[in-house]
Image: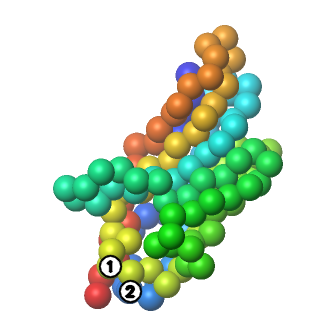
Amino acid sequence: QVQLVESGGGLVQAGGSLRLSCAASGIIASINAMGWYRQAPGKQRDLVAAITSGGSTNYTDSVKGRFTISRDNAKNTMYLQMNSLKPEDTAVYYCNADATIRGVGRRQVWGQGTLVTVST
């Protein structure tokens, strides 16, 4: 039906940058809000940043001023630019979309996750 595929994770030194991408494919009628979540080992999955179809954004306090979420509605793709990375940003990052799927209806869709590791 609908797939979200993340890319761009990897290993980076503290202070460095990474850009995550999330591409949606399938029989999509529309995508409403999208978001990036992360889950560190032994911890729950938490929202990092979200963006509406109109471009309004919100961020968790710990990443404000360092991370920027954006999306290209024409390409059904979302991005997360991560600057000034810290070791505490280490986690698996998941893409989420509130999508309306043709013939199915509205669903929450998750990507498979991409690992971000920030070394000291």
Q: Residue at x 25, y 55 (%)?
A: 43
* Mark number displayed over residue 99: none
Above or below, 67 against 85 in this view is above
Residue that protrudes farthest toward the front in the picture: 61
Q: Is residue 63 left or right of residue 24?
A: left
Q: Which residue is mark 1?
A: 87
Q: Residue at x 66, y 52 (%)?
A: 51
CB under 8 Å between discs 2 and 1: yes
Under mark 2, the amino acid is Ala
Cα–Cα gap, marks 2 and 1 = 6 Å
Circle 2: element type: loop
Under mark 1, the amino acid is Pro
Q: Is residue 114 visible?
A: no
Q: Which residue is mark 2?
A: 14
Q: Quadrant of the C terminus?
A: bottom left
Circle 1: element type: helix
Q: Position of residue 88 (x, y in %)?
A: 33, 74
Above or below, 105 against 53 in this view is above
Tell which of 18 and 59 is nearer to you: 59
Residue that protrudes farthest toward the left in the picture: 42
Q: Residues within 10 Å of mark 2 (few under 14, many from 20)?
A: some
Picture quarter containing residue 91? bottom left
Q: Is residue 85 visible?
A: yes
Q: Earlier in the sequence, mark 2 or mark 1?
A: 2
Q: Quadrant of the N terminus?
A: top right
Q: Residue at x 63, y 31 (%)?
A: 99
Q: How is the image coloured?
A: rainbow
Tell which of 14 and 9 is nearer to you: 14
Picture quarter containing residue 55? bottom right
Q: Position of residue 52 (x, y in %)?
A: 71, 47
